[in-house]
Image (cartoon, rainbow, N blue to C red):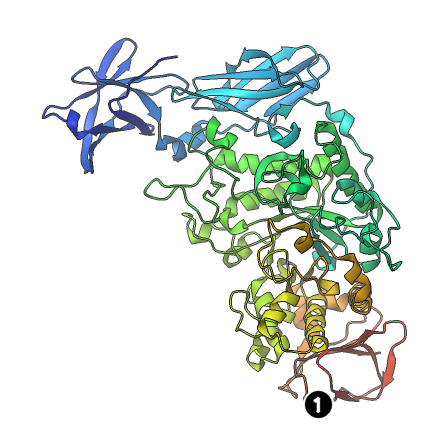
């Protein structure tokens, strides 16, 4: 390898343009630069010259084509020499088109008699694959061959199952050793990729009937470890994947816990916080730290801290696949949370080491953008980043049989990538559910290109977390002093009508609205209410909490419940518990018994939503036709679902959301005999209460009446 003593620096910033930075001490009146090519010096045409602090910057025109994968030298008129480094050219559209690779064979493809390695590294001058035995001692290193579109490949004959491997890439005369970004199996703590036989990871699939309408979903969000780590969870494999395989578990009070509890609750989809390999939890000592998992390390391989044997690369794959099929056996579908917007550490990422500067977004001054708040934004608009995202999501569908994805900070990603992704996923699993956080974040991507709520109509098969729904009902997440509808805020009434009706001002169809008041982010609703009104009686706070949850479950759109919300989950007022101890994050299964009455209430609301399709109408047209708000009682939020016997057992449904605590109101329902199935304290689907049409609304909360 060449050793260069750089007195100045030269960067290929465009296909035909070189930027040269030279210290002012080397400046001369007749400055000239030459490209050494084919043993001759080709003079560069200086287009611009700029004064930059202690340096002069020259923009020079190239007349010859640069061949990527080769090392070129730049010489000045005094014989000073430097290598031509790959600069901002890799962020140009010309580079993207030149090196777009569409093959589906990146990574290590194992067969019993050979393994084929392929990696994308278009700016590298040399690439090697290095094999290790499981004692981590180097076994052998092989030169890879440069192939089409910037890929490098090698086929090694023999059986290499179980070997660890890395790539070594030389870019800009610097060698880096990296784990394969496409590695599907990794060693403990993700130090190496591992060559495995995928056939040995197969878990028999449980075939579920097609899920017809997204609005039929009730999503329940939970973390693998939180699910079972509590001392009273009744599960043996606490904090592990295998806790999700345990059936008929109970807490000390004899009440159901675990997967049996989820099945009884009636939700349809379990949304798991990230399960791919992530940083900041030592897989050898998993209980010594905690993390939600939004620090992605390896995107294709499962996290090892949840495995009973993180040293076995097969074990975690089989365990996680078994979790998914265990949930399928209980008719529960699985959405996984994926983080395609950033990496844990840009500088240490295989992306940055293999193709420096390509995978991340930069501002107009050349600084890495930070819309994610963690120091880097993935540049999803670049073709090979887009390919990586689509390839990865497809792998999880094909190999792990997941039923959908929740995209963390989706607003960082671009609309075109998400559009291509939705088309690919629905071709593989037509009833998959895709949802994401459509926040408008400060990343250098044009507003009309961002996958934000503002652009929801451009990606109509993807749903969005409806933050208006969240904040109008319970009060702004970002202002403790803001009080929401459930605290009697009459000014929120008109907004509430739109939210209950599927948020037509935000979305063209109700299935794009993910209705929620609580998630893993920010305070739990219980802690939010406690911070807003700490002196309020606990029983009243429970009423408000139950009220908010009832609106989530009965509104048009897709309801989303945070695990434990149904039994007043608290994180002891910790707002951002991403790395807090288990005692803050765990699902307190004792509370499931203490607040059993509320659990039954929420269970009943879910049953009601499932029983009658009028609460989950699939189109905006049907909502407009069948939902009518009652304007006779302006102090109440009340509406009728009329002529809806086509969607369920009742022809007329009347819903009242009373947000007043101590203001009894008498209302007259349309003529006829009515029956009450929901009041603020009980859901009575199987033993409804017969009523005349004059009703006293005297408690804060939700009322549901029906008649035929």
Residue drawn where x is 74% and y is 39% of the image: 401
Q: Left or right: where does residue 304 sit relative to residue 238?
A: left
Residue 603 picture quarter: bottom right
In-front residue for pair 590/486 = 590
- Say few, some or many: other residues with alpha carbon within 10 Å of mark 1 (under 14 / 14 to 19 / 20 or more): some
Residue 404 in picture, x, y percent from top left: 68, 46
Foreground residue among 41 and 580: 580
How far across and down, in percent of the image, does residue 64 sit?
A: 29, 20
Position of 236 relative to 59 (above/below): below
User: Quarter-wise, where is residue 509 in the image?
Assistant: bottom right
The quadrant the C terminus occupies is bottom right
Looking at this view, name the residue that lies furthest to the left: 29
* Quadrant assignment, res 179: top right
Q: Which residue is mark 1?
A: 665
* Residue at the image point whose x is 63% and y is 34% from the top: 300
**Above or below for 633 versus 704:** below
Number of callouts: 1
Measured as percent of width and height from the top left, residue 96 is found at: 44, 32
690, 210: nearer the viewer: 690
Q: Residue at x 82, y 63 (%)?
A: 593
Residue farthest front in this picture: 288
Q: Quadrant of the N terminus?
A: top left
Residue 305 shows in this picture: yes
Vertical side of 186 occupied by 540: above or below: below
Tell me: 244 left or right of 474.
right
The secondary element bearing badge 1 is classed as strand
Indicate whether 249 appears above or below 191: below
Q: Residue 504, can we see it?
A: no
Front residue of this view, candidates 420 and 243: 243
Residue sitting at x 53%, y 53%? 458
């Amino acid at each position: 390898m060449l050793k260069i003593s750089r007195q100045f620096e030269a960067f290929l910033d465009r296909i035909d343009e070189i930027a040269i930075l030279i210290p002012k001490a080397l400046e001369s009146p007749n400055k000239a630069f030459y490209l050494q090519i084919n043993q001759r010096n080709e003079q560069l045409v200086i287009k611009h010259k700029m004064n930059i602090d202690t340096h002069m910057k020259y923009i020079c025109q190239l007349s010859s084509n640069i061949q990527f994968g080769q090392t070129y030298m730049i010489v000045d008129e005094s014989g000073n020499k430097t290598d031509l480094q790959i600069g901002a050219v890799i962020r140009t559209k010309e580079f993207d088109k030149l090196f777009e690779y569409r093959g589906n064979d990146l990574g290590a493809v194992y067969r019993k008699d050979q393994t084929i390695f392929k990696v994308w590294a278009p700016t590298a001058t040399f690439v090697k694959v290095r094999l290790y035995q499981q004692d981590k001692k180097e076994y052998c290193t092989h030169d890879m061959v440069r192939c089409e579109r910037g890929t490098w490949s090698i086929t090694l004959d023999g059986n290499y199952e179980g070997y660890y491997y890395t790539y070594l890439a030389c870019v800009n005369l610097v060698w880096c050793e990296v784990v394969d970004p496409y590695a599907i199996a990794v060693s403990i703590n993700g130090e190496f990729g591992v060559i495995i036989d995928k056939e040995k990871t197969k878990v028999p699939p449980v075939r579920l009937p097609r899920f017809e309408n997204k609005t039929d979903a009730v999503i329940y969000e939970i973390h693998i470890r939180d699910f079972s780590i509590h001392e009273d969870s009744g599960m043996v494999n606490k904090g592990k994947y295998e806790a999700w395989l345990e059936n008929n578990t109970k807490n000390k009070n004899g009440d159901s816990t675990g997967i049996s509890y989820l099945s009884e609750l009636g939700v349809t989809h379990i949304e798991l916080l990230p399960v791919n390999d992530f940083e900041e939890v030592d897989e050898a000592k998993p209980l010594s730290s905690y993390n939600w998992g939004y620090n992605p390390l390896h995107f294709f391989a499962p996290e090892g801290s949840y495995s009973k044997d993180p040293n076995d690369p097969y074990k975690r794959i089989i365990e996680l696949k078994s979790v998914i099929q265990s949930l399928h056996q209980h008719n529960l579908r699985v959405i996984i949370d994926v983080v395609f917007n950033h990496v844990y550490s840009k500088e240490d990422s295989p992306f940055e080491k293999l193709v420096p500067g390509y995978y991340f977004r930069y501002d107009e001054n050349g600084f890495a953008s930070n819309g994610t708040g963690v120091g880097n934004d993935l540049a999803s608009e670049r073709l090979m980043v887009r390919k990586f995202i689509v390839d990865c999501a497809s792998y999880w569908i094909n190999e792990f049989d997941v039923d959908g994805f929740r995209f963390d900070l989706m607003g960082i990603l671009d609309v075109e990538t998400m559009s291509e992704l939705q088309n690919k996923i629905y071709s593989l699993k037509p009833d998959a559910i895709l949802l994401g956080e459509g926040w408008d974040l400060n990343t250098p991507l044009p507003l009309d290109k961002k996958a934000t709520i503002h652009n929801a109509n451009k990606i109509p098969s993807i749903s969005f977390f409806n933050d208006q729904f969240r904040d109008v009902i319970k009060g702004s997440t970002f202002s403790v002093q803001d009080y929401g509808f459930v605290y009697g805020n009459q000014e929120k009434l008109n907004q509430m009508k739109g939210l209950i009706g599927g948020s037509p001002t935000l979305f063209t169809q109700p299935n794009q609205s993910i209705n929620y008041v609580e998630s893993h982010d920010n305070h739990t609703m219980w802690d939010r209410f406690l911070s807003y009104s700490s002196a309020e009686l606990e029983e009243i706070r429970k009423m408000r909490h139950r009220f908010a949850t009832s609106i989530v479950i009965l509104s048009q759109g897709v309801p989303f419940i945070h695990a434990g919300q149904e039994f007043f989950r608290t994180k002891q007022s910790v707002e951002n518990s991403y790395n807090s101890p288990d005692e803050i994050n765990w699902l307190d299964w004792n509370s499931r018994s203490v607040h059993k009455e509320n659990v039954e209430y929420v269970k009943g609301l879910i049953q009601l939503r499932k029983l009658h399709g009028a609460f989950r109408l699939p189109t905006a047209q049907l909502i407009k036709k069948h939902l009518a708000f009652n304007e006779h009682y302006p102090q109440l939020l009340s509406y009728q679902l009329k002529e809806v016997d086509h969607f369920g057992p009742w022809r007329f449904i009347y819903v009242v959301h009373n947000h007043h605590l101590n203001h009894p109101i008498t209302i007259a329902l349309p003529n006829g005999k009515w029956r009450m199935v929901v009041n603020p304290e009980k859901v009575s689907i199987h033993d409804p209460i017969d009523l005349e049409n004059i009703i006293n609304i005297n408690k804060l909360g939700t009322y549901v009446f029906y008649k035929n």
